Amino acid sequence: MNERTETARGNEREPAPLRSRLGLRTWFAGYLLWMIGLTVAARWSLETAGNGAPLGQAVWLLAVFAFYLSLCCVFFPAPTTWIVLFAASNQAAAEAGVEEWSAARIVVVATIGALSTGLANLNEYHILTYVLGLPRVARVRGTRAYRAAAGWFGVSPFMALAAIGIVPIPVDVVRWLAISERYSRPRFFLAYFVGRWIRYAGLGVAALGLGLTRGHIVGIQAGLIFFAVLRFVLPRVRRRRIESAPAASPVPAAVPIPEPRPDGEPAYLPMQNREKIRPSSSSAASSPVSAARRSAAS
């Protein structure tokens, strides 16, 4: 049985009011306990680090790192690259006294980061599921565009979610498709965990290999934010210019006027154009050809 069939059968099993089966209160209680635990760990480790214990600095950094990434989702769209680079950097390792454990640092940063991001996306999953259960929003599922997108997503949902977890460009629509299609929450979490683990491990290797400092990391994140703003603003500026530009007045088509024939009659033209160029009675009477005809008739 393939993944697409299982997803479709899962859709049939879940009732219409999605929020009644997802246990929002249970989820948010667990999520709140997770955030409280990270806060307690950060506070304890900060006091330990103040007493001169290097391990306290490492625990504090990882607790703050996990707390921040656990918040980052569509409802809190904060940048994540900078904190991953800093957590894996040699400068942070020197402050925590773990410079010699390069490979272990990358594994720990990637694992804790992927776990925290996966929890943040599960939080988004539950909130959006509640919203998508509302009658007005649920009508979107009946549109042709939605059905086409859902058909594309159903081909390989796990790979699609893992892929958008790797790429640095946010592709929220794929994640929203998974939520609206009621994709399995464990698989949803696992797909994002795999994708983000690969991404965060790559950022960790870059931070170590390039020897990034705080200044470098700030510059990299500022550049990413700048390009993200341009990507958002430029299409809207271009659209406004097009809308505000004056409409061009239509240019009337020119009617070709052929040379007259030797007998004074105009050459062939369509009937609607003949009257426009037919010579007037006065000009026709004064023409040499007309005079010759009158003398011959008399």
Image (cartoon, helix red, strand yellow):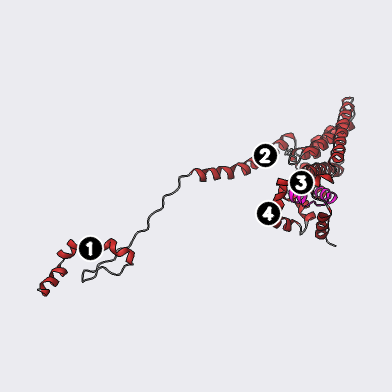
Q: Position of residue 218 (x, y in %)?
A: 71, 35
Q: Which of the marked residues, 2 or 3, is nearer the chain's N terminus?
A: 3
* Mark 1 → mark 4, Cα distance in angstroms: 63 Å
Circle 2 sits in a helix, a strand or a loop, which is it?
A: helix
Q: Is residue 276 visible?
A: yes
Q: Magenta stretch?
A: 175-192
* Mark 2 → mark 3, Cα distance in angstroms: 33 Å
Q: For this rendering, which residue is in front, 156 or 1? A: 1
Most common SS among magenta residues: helix
Q: Is residue 183 magenta?
A: yes
Contact (Cβ within 8 Å) of mark 1 with mark 2: no
* Mark 4 → mark 2, Cα distance in angstroms: 34 Å
Question: Taking 45 as reference, is 109 above or below it?
Answer: below
Amino acid type of the residue that numbered disc 1 sits on in the rendered structure: Pro
Q: Residue at x 49, y 43 (%)?
A: 244
Amino acid type of the residue that numbered disc 2 sits on in the rendered structure: Ile
| On-image quarter of the C terminus | bottom left
Q: Which of the marked residues, 1 or 3, is nearer the chain's N terminus?
A: 3
Q: For this rendering, which residue is in front, 88 or 158? A: 158
Q: Residue at x 12, y 74 (%)?
A: 297
Q: Which of the marked residues, 4 or 3, is nearer the chain's N terminus?
A: 3
Amino acid type of the residue that numbered disc 4 sits on in the rendered structure: Thr
* Mark 1 → mark 3, Cα distance in angstroms: 77 Å
Q: Residue at x 13, y 68 (%)?
A: 291
Amino acid type of the residue that numbered disc 3 sits on in the rendered structure: Gly
* Mark 4 → mark 3, Cα distance in angstroms: 16 Å
For mark 1, what is the residue? 279
Q: Which of the marked residues, 1 or 4, is nearer the chain's N terminus?
A: 4
Q: Is residue 61 magenta?
A: no
For mark 4, what is the residue? 143
For mark 2, what is the residue? 225
